[in-house]
Image (cartoon, rainbow, N blue to C red):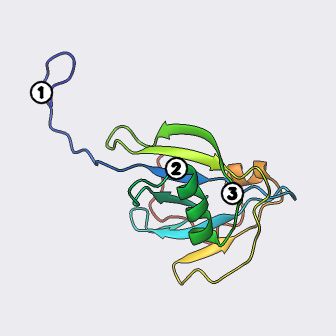
Amino acid sequence: MRDPDGASHQRDVVRHPGAVSVLPLHDDGTVTLVRQYRVALDGDLLEIPAGKADVAGEAAADLARRELAEEVGLSAASCERLVGFFLSPGYTDEWQRRFWPPASPRYPPRPMGPRRTTWRCWPDLDEALDGTRCLPSTPRRRSPC
């Protein structure tokens, strides 16, 4: 590739179809997260439900509702878009849309499999955003920051 100044560089770029993520905030102030092992970090992360746009023609809000059901077993009548952003534009063109179900999603628990465990452990959203509570194991590969 050539940058705007004309210098030549070699770059790896990951092309991505896009994704959604959903912030399932409940009436009691808790948020439902999914614990997933991430091989790049060699450890578990707590994440909000999210998924790749892998069904042709599926509306982003419908994808958000589907991911909410698939990842954490929640049902929402609707999802409203909060924001859209590039996830990591230094190496990928992935555009992610973040959604929020305006009515507290229903929570019929169901087993998620050995590598995906549902957690609903924060008394309020601020603690969830802090991310320091309820993580049973931290990634072995640590950030230098």
Q: Amino acid at mark 2?
A: Ala
Is 77 situated left or right of 29 in this image? Answer: left
Marks 3 and 1, Cα distance to the nearest angstrom? 42 Å
Q: Mark 3 or 1, which is nearer the eye?
A: 1
Marks 3 and 2, Cα distance to the nearest angstrom? 30 Å
Is 140 situated left or right of 89 in this image? Answer: right
Q: Find residue 144 and report its horizontal and vertical position in percent.
A: 47, 47
| Residue nearest the observer in this picture, 107 or 92 | 107
Q: Which residue sits at x=75%, y=62%?
A: 105
- Element type at mark 2: helix
Q: Mark 3: few, some, or many residues within 10 Å (few <14, many ≥20)?
A: few
Q: Mark 2: few, some, or many residues within 10 Å (few <14, many ≥20)?
A: many
* Residue 118 vertical position relative to residue 12 in the rendered view, above or below: below
Q: Mark 2 or 1, which is nearer the eye?
A: 2
Q: Which residue sits at x=19%, y=15%?
A: 5
Q: Residue furthest front?
A: 57
- Element type at mark 3: loop
- Element type at mark 1: loop
Q: Amino acid at mark 3?
A: Thr
What residue is shown with label 2? 60
Is 124 situated left or right of 110 in this image? Answer: right
Q: Quadrant of residue 53?
A: bottom left
* Residue 22 vertical position relative to residue 33 in the rendered view, above or below: above
Q: Quadrant of residue 52?
A: bottom left
Nearest to N terminus: mark 2 or mark 1: 1
Contact between marks 3 and 2 (CB within 8 A): the answer is no
Q: Amino acid at mark 1?
A: Ser
Marking on residue 132? 3
| Residue nearest the observer in this picture, 136 or 97 | 97
What residue is shown with label 1? 8
Q: Which residue sits at x=83%, y=59%?
A: 123
